[in-house]
């Protein structure tokens, strides 16, 4: 996925913004907690919620790259 790809339309959150938010957290073992932290930082999935799975997929992709 490209860093400018929008994955949360309501809040205009890009893949790159999710990646940046993840860099601020050391504990990458708990995906649910990581999702919540990314959500707090980017406000993704707080509008209609339709991007929830896309955000989790982005987090999984980024964790796999590490």
Image (tube, rainbow, N blue to C red):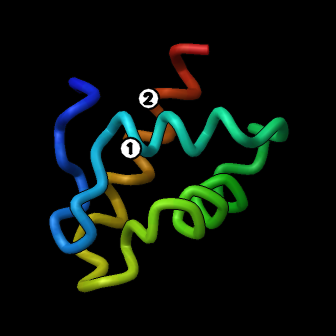
Q: Are marks 2 and 1 in contact (CB under 8 Å)?
A: yes
Mark on residue 57?
1
**Residue 10 drawn at (x, y percent):** 20, 73
Residue 13: quarter of image: bottom left
Left or right relative to 23: residue 59: left
Left or right relative to 10: residue 33: right
Dot 1: element:
helix
Count residues near mark 2 (Cα–Cα under 10 Å), then give few for <14, some for 14-19, many for 20+.
Answer: few
Judged from this view, the residue extending furthest toward the top is 66
- Give 29 or 1, whichever is nearer the viewer: 1
**Residue 14 drawn at (x, y percent):** 28, 45
Left or right relative to 21: residue 49: left
Would you name the residue on which mark 2 appears? 61
Is 58 located above or below residue 45 in the figure? above
Residue drawn at (24%, 85%) of the image: 48
Residue drawn at (37%, 72%) of the image: 45
């Amino acid at each position: 996925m490209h860093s400018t790809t929008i994955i949360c339309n309501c809040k205009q959150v890009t893949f790159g913004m999710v990646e940046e938010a993840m860099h601020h957290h050391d504990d990458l073992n708990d995906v649910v907690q990581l999702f919540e932290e990314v959500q707090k930082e980017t406000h993704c999935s707080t509008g209609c919620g339709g991007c929830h799975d896309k955000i989790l997929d982005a987090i999984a992709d980024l964790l796999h790259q590490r």
